[in-house]
């Protein structure tokens, strides 16, 4: 195999190897997940783990399927908070990072504050948001922004600063305007970093949404968990957790899909052996 | 942090020298940098005249200010004193009337070879159709006609540098400045690119300012070699290379060629740049 790897040149053989692994490699992670679920089910059914502590996967699944009509509005409510919060995080974070990378003044004055502000546990300010914005969507989106915008800013700043000086020299020698330099050279260069930040933000947005719904909500999966908890319905809690995980994963995948479309040229997107 | 180069950009004039290359006049140019501890004099009173269509190499040890000189000619840095004129126009800001090639190819990873060359057309807002034709022609001249749609990471180092040379030439600049363009390439690729570059130079009729630290490369390529001394950088000697053109690789086996190499080597020895143990 190592001889094979040595002998393989560019393009063609890479493609060959990708096909090979695609055709023959078993989905290890999926198999591991199924095995874990079976072990879990086994422990619940035959080893006497009480259902009020750990519900069996089968019961969780049953609750999900039988009461899907109950869950759907809550899924939608949480999705709206996640999506709006994420979009707002990017809408705030990206321009802010551009400002920080291009203005020495803001870089010196604001950047340390933004980095320093991360020591504030954002979960702790969630009730404050409620006091400021009342109930409804606004405080929830605000909490998501507080949690999710940081990786967008930091990663974008890193990306925007990564343009090699030669590239800027080159642009100047072509008579490029500042806008052209940003749009044609710096932004595409920063895109891998920006997208990495967005992936982190996508995961954090789910956390933010749940925190927001814990603090004050009458809908959403976070609310479902709280309500089920007060009814000692642990199966329902697990069902909501499963749904939240699925939401987070789906959201992450969407960003990855966008990434594959936007930066097929980047190292991170090339075929791995 | 993005470094924005200030100063008005040098406008492209009505190119009186079109087709013959630019002339460059450097008068008493000095450049010093302020560091935290002291002031570094990178260049002191440099005088140089580069004629239209000439191939001039600037050679010197690391830190002799040769790259600084090139940046000044390109208008990407400002002189501390003295003047630089390209085609009788004083350089005060980025000179967009040139082509530029760096040691790192500085290709945009997200654009294929052809599109990297066409970047020049997009930024300068040149005519698309004619630029496209010229880009294809240039890529063909360096043997990359099969690689139009290859992304930079699919190309070898030598191919990437060829693309960046084509990009520098798309707008037919009268002046091409190159900063150790072949420094990162293996010897064989280097030879090939030298041959390619000479072919392009003959074909395009432009002035080339070529920075290198390879003596043999300078002798093989140049009409004149500007030998620079270490810090503070100044011009030590200018050597006329009177080897016949068009030059072929075989010229490197001739005694005349060896004599030129010897001469430059001796200068570096006398400057203390090259040291040998006494026999």
Image (cartoon, coloured by chain):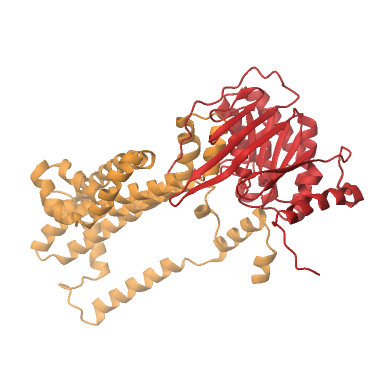
Residue closer to the observer: B8 or A254: B8
Task: Please indicate whether residue B155 sits to the left or right of residue A124 in the image.
Answer: right
When the figure is inspected, residue A207 is found, relative to residue B207, above or below; the finding is below
Q: Residue B154: x and y, percent? A: 63, 50
Q: Residue at x 12, y 63 (%)?
A: A229
User: Residue, x 42% and y 69% (percent of image)?
Assistant: A31
Question: Percent from the top left, x then y, of residue B89?
Answer: 62, 22
Residue found at the very far right of the displayed protein: B255
Q: Position of residue B246 (x, y in %)?
A: 87, 37
- Residue at left offset 17%, top offset 51%: A212
Q: Seen in the image, is B87 located left or right of residue A217?
A: right
Q: Choose top left, top right, bottom left or bottom right for residue B13.
A: top right
Q: Is residue A1 visible?
A: no
Residue at (81%, 45%) from the top-left corner? B220
Q: How many marks?
A: 0
The C terminus of chain A - image quarter: bottom right
**Chain A: colour as depicted:** orange
Quarter holding residue B90: top right
Colour chain B is painted in: red
Q: Identify the image quadrant of the N terminus of chain A.
A: bottom right
Front position in the image: B151 or B42 = B42
Q: Position of residue A33 (x, y in %)?
A: 37, 69
Residue A15: in sight, yes or no? yes
- In this rendering, is residue B25 above or below A120? above
């Amino acid at each position: 195999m190592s001889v094979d790897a040595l002998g393989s040149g560019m393009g063609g053989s890479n493609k060959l190897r990708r096909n090979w692994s695609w055709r023959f490699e078993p989905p290890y992670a999926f198999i591991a997940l199924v095995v874990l679920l079976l072990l879990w089910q086994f422990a619940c059914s035959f080893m006497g783990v009480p259902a009020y502590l750990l519900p069996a996967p089968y019961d969780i699944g049953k609750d999900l399927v039988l009461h899907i009509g109950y869950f759907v509005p809550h899924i939608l409510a949480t999705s709206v908070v996640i999506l709006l919060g994420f979009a707002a995080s990017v809408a705030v974070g990206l321009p802010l990072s551009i400002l920080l990378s291009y203005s020495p003044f803001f870089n010196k004055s604001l950047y340390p504050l933004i980095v320093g502000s991360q020591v504030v546990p954002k979960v702790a300010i969630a009730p404050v948001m409620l006091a400021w914005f009342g109930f409804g969507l606004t405080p929830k989106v605000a909490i998501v922004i507080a949690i999710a915008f940081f990786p967008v800013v930091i990663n974008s700043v890193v990306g925007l600063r990564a343009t090699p000086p030669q590239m800027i020299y080159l642009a100047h020698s072509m008579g490029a305007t500042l806008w052209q330099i940003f749009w044609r050279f710096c932004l595409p260069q920063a895109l891998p970093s920006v997208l990495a930040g967005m992936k982190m933000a996508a995961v954090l947005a789910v956390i933010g949404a749940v925190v927001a719904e814990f603090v004050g909500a009458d809908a959403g999966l976070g609310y479902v968990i709280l309500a089920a908890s007060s009814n000692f319905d642990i199966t329902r809690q697990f069902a909501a957790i499963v749904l939240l995980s699925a939401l987070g994963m789906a959201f992450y995948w969407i960003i990855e899909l966008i990434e594959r479309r936007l930066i097929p040229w980047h190292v991170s997107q090339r075929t791995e052996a | 942090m993005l470094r924005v180069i200030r100063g008005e950009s040098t406008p492209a004039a009505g190119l009186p020298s079109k087709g013959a290359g630019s002339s460059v006049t450097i008068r008493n140019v000095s450049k010093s940098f302020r560091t935290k501890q002291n002031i570094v004099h990178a260049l002191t009173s440099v005088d140089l005249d580069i004629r239209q269509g000439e191939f001039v190499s600037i050679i010197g040890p690391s830190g002799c200010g040769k790259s600084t000189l090139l940046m000044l000619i390109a208008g990407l840095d400002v002189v501390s004193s003295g003047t630089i004129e390209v085609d009788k126009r004083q350089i005060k800001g980025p000179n967009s009337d040139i082509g530029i090639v760096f040691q790192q190819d500085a290709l945009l990873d997200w654009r294929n070879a052809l599109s990297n060359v066409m970047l020049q057309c997009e930024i300068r807002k040149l005519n698309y159709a004619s630029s496209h034709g010229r880009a294809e022609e240039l890529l063909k001249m360096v043997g990359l006609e099969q690689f139009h749609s290859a992304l930079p990471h699919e190309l070898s180092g030598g191919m990437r540098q060829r693309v960046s040379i084509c990009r520098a030439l798309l707008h037919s600049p009268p002046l091409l400045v190159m900063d150790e363009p072949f420094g990162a390439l293996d010897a064989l690729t280097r030879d090939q690119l030298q041959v390619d570059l000479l072919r392009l130079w003959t074909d395009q009729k432009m002035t080339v300012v070529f920075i290198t630290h390879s003596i043999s490369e300078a002798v093989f390529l140049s009409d004149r070699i500007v030998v620079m001394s270490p810090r503070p950088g100044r011009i030590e000697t200018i050597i006329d290379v009177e080897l016949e053109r068009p030059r072929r690789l075989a010229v490197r086996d001739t005694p005349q060629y060896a004599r030129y190499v010897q001469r430059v080597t001796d200068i570096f020895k006398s400057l203390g740049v090259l040291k040998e143990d006494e026999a």
